Amino acid sequence: MDEPHPRHPAQNPDVAVEVPIRSLLAADSPRTVPVDESHAQALAHSDRTLPPLLVHRPTMRIIDGTHRLRAAVLCGRDTVGVTFFDGSAEDAFVISVETNISHGLPLTQAERTTAALRILRSHPDWSDRGIARRTGLAARTVATLRRREAPGPAPPGRVGQDGRVRPADPVRGREAAARLLAGRPTASLRQIAREAGIAPSTVRDVRRRIGEGVDPVPAAQRRSADTPAPAPPPVPPRGRGQPLPVLVTSLCKDPLLRLSEAGRLLLRMLDLQVSGLRQWERIVAAIPPYRVETAAAAAAQCARDWQELSDELRRRASAHTPA
């Protein structure tokens, strides 16, 4: 369902109606012991007016009020006041857990844990905090249950308590945004955010980080998600490197290079080098004899400049490689 807070008319006494007790079915309760007779006896002998039961209309199954129903039976009544909930059976169970948490006999830790696991299966797109609030557990406990015991693939996003959808894995969301920005650098923030399943402000931060030449995912998020940062490809030894077109093609696939101005400049320089190599003979033939020495000197100087750049990159790679 779209809304993370199932609504029901339990707080509205005007919708309460009398129904035959025999028409009601037992509750789909998170409790392992459905009825505590001593509690039901106490309610039966109480002088106060008890609130109506909450019933799932499609099935006539009790959502909240099992002990009040038992008290009515002990008092010899044939009917009981109820209010109806018309949602799904899964949402009815959620409301049953919430009402048992908020009043009446408290649920045990095992009962709350079992209820949380069931809600995780029926509402996998709900946030850990939202399920924790409904079951009386800690958010960390729900997160552990989700990782360890909840089956099925993880949804792309989760509905928070405020109704907003957030990515289940922020690291994957940022990486998806980086890939989309690399392919469509002129796309709007909202368009990228919608496709990556993250907020436009997060896309803006990803674009900023890429422009600065750093990982689009902050180190703290990678550590919390236990996701290793993408390792740079190993630098091949001199004299045994891959062909230049293969190396340039690999570099062109990197979003960090494609989205930064300096990175795009490097890719253009390398692409021009590849194009020149493919027309080497034509270039040599086109140089006038009286310009051969000058062109050779310029080529030699370019080679020295490229070598200095190569040496600097290797020093940088060595400095970032753990011993």
Image: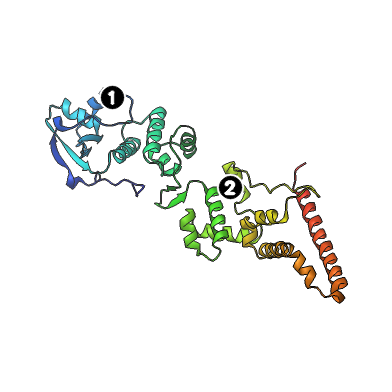
SS of the residue at dot 2? helix
Q: CA distance from mark 2 to mark 1?
A: 47 Å
Q: Residues within 10 Å of mark 2 (few under 14, many from 20)?
A: few
Identify the mark nearer the N-term, 2 or 1: 1
- Residue at coordinates 21% horizontally, 42% vertically from top-left? 84
- Residue at coordinates 22% horizontally, 47% vertically from top-left? 12
Residue 268 picture location, percent across and down: 68, 65
Name the quadrant containing residue 39.
Answer: top left
Q: Hey, what amino acid is under mark 1? A: Asp
SS of the residue at dot 1? loop
In the figure, 132 relative to 306: above or below? above
Q: Which residue does the numbered mark 1 point to in the structure image?
A: 36
State which mark lies toward you, 2 or 1: 2
Residue 91 picture location, percent across and down: 31, 41
> Are the two marked residues, 2 and 1, in contact with CB atoms closer than 8 angstroms?
no
Q: Which residue does the numbered mark 2 point to in the structure image?
A: 221
Q: Hey, what amino acid is under mark 2? A: Gln
Indicate left or right for 320 with 31 as reference: right
Residue 163 picture location, percent across and down: 39, 51
Name the quadrant containing residue 112.
Answer: top left
Does residue 64 appear anywhere in the picture?
no
Q: Which one is nearer the viewer's eye here, 165 or 275?
A: 275
